């Protein structure tokens, strides 16, 4: 890829991650994980900020443990997530904003 | 103060916290349902037995003051006092599901920053106890700086204590006017707020970490990609079965009773215009509203049970991906399902959809779901023209025809939604749908909800049907036929004139002038078409059962292609003034409403035309 130096700042910053950290949307059914961060990936255009805020308000905060309960009909979407004793259905767009570290089931 | 003002309490809480059941308990299930000025979001207000000059407002469920749906905006604006024609509430009663304290307390702390007097109602206290959650009420009350009451909304427990607290606060504040508030900025971040909640919880609550196992086991089935869909189909099948077959005997009974009443009254009063008006206008008109009730009640009962039990959001979850592909989402599932009963509540239910574009598409396609008002029309024509025959040894041809009409509506809705979606692309909205805990539906709550829904139907829809039946009677009766008249009296009436004028336009669809006349009163509500056809063919005058008398007669008078075209017309035509009125109020746009009406009439015309021509071609060869 040919990128001149003046363009280099326009490349989106990759979020530097540990190999283990991944978005909720990449988890398998039954996985347990702990939230690391709600990212600012701009999936939602002008609503991006309000979606991030709402996710946090619903309890998707760093440190919270989550469980993947299941997926919708004939696809990997939406994703049902258990968190703090409540269950929410998320689409991949909002699920990919939430970065987690998988926890080994005990 | 010379005049005592009405003291306003407002119930605020997350969706699914049992707020509405608590409202029903507190008010004795006597809600006045109206709309907030300018919007069609339902405003439920009730008086409080035992508290003079006080009223209780049930606000739409909300997670946060930073709103993401029209529903939540209403809740916020009412609380702040920024709603037109609404004085701000004096006291907020925050309802929190005791089994979901974290989420509920977050809203409570947000509300508390407004400095309005508050009471905290810890609802579902029994479920919390069963799960082993122990809450120290006094300590929590100290921490939050507000009275805390435990309630079990599905029983009467705690409601008395809550009323006592409310009475005390009313006495204390009777001479203070609540101020209008401004609220713009977050004063603390979500993280800080949750940190405070954690310390409050650590201080006042001991909670185990496990949910009851049966909930998860049930979800493993209900939300399973295969078993879940089988469950969903079973539920839908059962619902339709109930609406169609269980309602029938009751509907027949009502029908017979109304006819008996008509005959009885008819014999008491001398023949003449008054007799005719009472029997064929007023009583027959009321009958056409009442016959409808059993189906409405059964369908609403099913929807309420599915809603209360926590099942509907799961169905929405399963179907979300499927519906996204046509521009809708799981959230549109509930409004569309309700539209099978009646598009009016269905369209009203779209207010929970956050995406304005998706909401508009859902409103536009909702009337394509076959509502129960079409059934009488379908039933009449199917029984007259489609033979009672078995197909492939398994299906009944009549039932199969009905099924095809339902499917035609659904497929059309998918296509229309898809076209509307590809026409305009907008922002992406999240789903973020809570899947609440399963609960055993509560009978008291169910009956309150049912009575409310049925009341709305009778008032808003029934009055329209009844008044139009009377207008139709007038149009079909006056002017009286000339003495030398040879045809049916109605042919010389205003209705006959209008029908004759319309007929050339509908001739390409195979409609005769009697069918055209019936379309006019059927603008009020589709099922009126049946009684209108009966009037036009002078069948109702005999006072016997419409369907059994009219069916064979139509079989002789109409050709099969004409009958099929009439069916196709009713799949699409927006023949329902109430629906059109609701669309206008919901979209708040004459343009959208005009688009709605014209696209549906255009589809109806095209569908009837194609059906007529194709049937002619097939049957003559």
Image (spheres, rainbow, N blue to C red):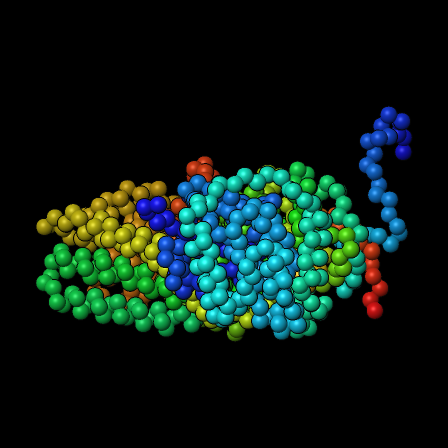
The x, y position of residue B517, in whole percent, is 29, 49
Q: Residue at x 55, y 47 (%)?
A: B115
Is any part of residue B312 visible from this angle? no
When the figure is inspected, residue B385 is found, relative to residue B189, above or below; the finding is: below
User: Is residue B497 in view?
Assistant: yes
Q: Nearer the viewer, residue B213 or B105?
A: B105
**Picture coordinates of residue B232 (x, y %)?**
59, 66
| On-image quarter of the N terminus of chain B | top left
Relative height, residue B287 to residue B112 (above, below): below
Residue closer to the observer: B557 or B214: B214
Residue at the (36%, 71%) spot, across then down: B250
* Side of B105 relative to B86 (left or right): right
Left or right: B57 in relation to B494:
right
The location of residue B500, given as percent across then percent down, is 27, 44
Residue in front for this viewpoint, B606 or B280: B280
Q: Is residue B501 above or below residue B394?
A: above
- x, y percent for residue B267: 13, 68
Report the label total.
0
- Could you tell me which residue is drawn at 46 percent across and 67 percent down? B160
Q: Residue at x 38, y 63 (%)?
A: B50
Q: Residue furthest top?
A: A6
Query: Toward the viewer: B325 or B54?
Result: B54
Residue B30 appears in which quarter of the rendering? Answer: bottom left
B479 relative position to B5: left or right? left
Which quadrant is home to the C terminus of chain B?
A: bottom left
């Amino acid at each position: 890829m040919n990128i001149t130096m003046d363009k280099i700042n326009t490349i989106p910053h990759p979020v530097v991650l540990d190999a283990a950290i991944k978005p909720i949307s990449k988890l398998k059914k039954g996985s347990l994980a702990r939230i690391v961060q709600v990212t600012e990936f701009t999936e939602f255009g002008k609503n991006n900020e309000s979606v991030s805020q709402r996710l946090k308000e619903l309890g998707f905060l760093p440190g919270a443990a989550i469980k993947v309960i299941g997926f919708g009909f004939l696809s990997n979407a939406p994703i049902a997530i258990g968190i703090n004793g409540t269950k929410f259905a998320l689409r991949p767009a909002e699920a990919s904003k939430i970065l987690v570290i998988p926890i080994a089931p005990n | 103060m010379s005049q005592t003002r009405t003291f306003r309490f407002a119930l605020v809480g997350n969706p699914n916290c049992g707020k509405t059941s608590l409202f029903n308990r507190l008010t004795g299930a006597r809600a006045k349902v109206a709309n907030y000025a300018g919007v069609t979001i339902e405003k439920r207000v009730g008086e409080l037995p035992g508290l003079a000059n006080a009223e209780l407002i049930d606000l739409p469920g909300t997670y946060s003051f930073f709103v993401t749906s029209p529903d939540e905006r209403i809740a916020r604006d009412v609380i702040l006092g920024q709603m037109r024609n609404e004085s701000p509430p004096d006291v907020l009663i925050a309802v929190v599901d005791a089994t979901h304290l974290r989420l509920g307390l977050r809203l409570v702390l947000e509300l508390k920053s407004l400095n309005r007097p508050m009471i905290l109602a810890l609802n579902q206290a029994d479920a919390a106890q069963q799960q082993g959650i122990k809450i120290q009420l006094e300590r929590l009350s100290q921490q939050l700086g507000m009275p805390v009451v435990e309630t079990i909304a599905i029983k009467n427990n705690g409601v008395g204590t809550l009323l006592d607290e409310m009475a005390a606060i009313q006495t204390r504040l009777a001479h203070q006017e609540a101020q209008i508030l401004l609220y713009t900025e977050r004063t603390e971040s979500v993280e800080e707020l949750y940190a405070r909640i954690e310390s409050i919880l650590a201080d006042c609550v001991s909670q185990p970490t496990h949910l009851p196992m049966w909930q998860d086991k049930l979800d493993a089935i209900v939300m399973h990609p295969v078993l879940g869909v089988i469950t969903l189909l079973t539920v839908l099948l059962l619902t339709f079965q109930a609406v169609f077959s269980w309602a029938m005997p009751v509907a027949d009974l009502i029908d017979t009773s109304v006819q008996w009443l008509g005959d009885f009254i008819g014999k008491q009063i001398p023949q003449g215009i008054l007799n005719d008006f009472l029997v064929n206008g007023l009583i027959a008109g009321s009958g056409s509203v009442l016959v409808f009730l059993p189906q409405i009640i059964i369908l609403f009962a099913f929807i309420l049970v599915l809603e209360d039990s926590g099942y509907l959001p799961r169905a929405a979850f399963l179907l979300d991906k499927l519906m996204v592909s046509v521009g809708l989402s799981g959230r549109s599932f509930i409004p569309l399902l309700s539209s099978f009963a009646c598009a009016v509540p269905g369209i009203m239910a779209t207010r929970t959809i956050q995406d304005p574009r998706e909401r508009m598409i859902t409103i536009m396609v909702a009337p394509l779901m076959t509502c129960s008002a079409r059934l009488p029309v379908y039933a009449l024509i199917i029984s007259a023209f489609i033979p009672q025959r078995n197909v492939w040894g398994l299906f009944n041809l009549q039932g199969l025809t009905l099924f095809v009409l339902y499917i035609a509506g659904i497929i059309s809705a998918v296509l229309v939604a898809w076209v509307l979606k590809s026409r305009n692309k907008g922002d992406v909205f999240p789903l973020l749908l809570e899947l609440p805990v399963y609960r055993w539906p509560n009978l008291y709550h169910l009956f309150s909800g049912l009575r409310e829904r049925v009341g709305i139907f009778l008032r808003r829809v029934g009055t329209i049907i009844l008044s139009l039946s009377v207008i139709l009677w007038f149009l079909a009766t006056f002017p009286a036929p000339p003495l030398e008249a040879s045809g049916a009296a109605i042919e010389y009436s205003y209705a006959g004139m209008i029908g004759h004028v319309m007929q050339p336009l509908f001739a390409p669809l195979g409609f005769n002038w009697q069918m055209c006349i019936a379309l006019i009163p059927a603008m009020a509500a589709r099922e009126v078409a049946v009684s209108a056809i009966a009037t036009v063919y002078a069948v109702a005058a005999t006072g016997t059962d419409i369907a059994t008398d009219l069916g064979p007669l139509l079989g002789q008078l109409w050709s099969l292609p004409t009958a099929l075209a009439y069916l196709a017309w009713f799949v699409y035509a927006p023949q329902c003034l109430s629906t059109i009125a609701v669309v206008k109020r919901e979209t708040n746009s004459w343009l959208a409403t005009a688009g709605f009406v014209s696209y549906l009439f255009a589809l109806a015309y095209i569908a009837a035309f194609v059906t007529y021509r194709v049937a002619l071609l097939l049957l003559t060869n």
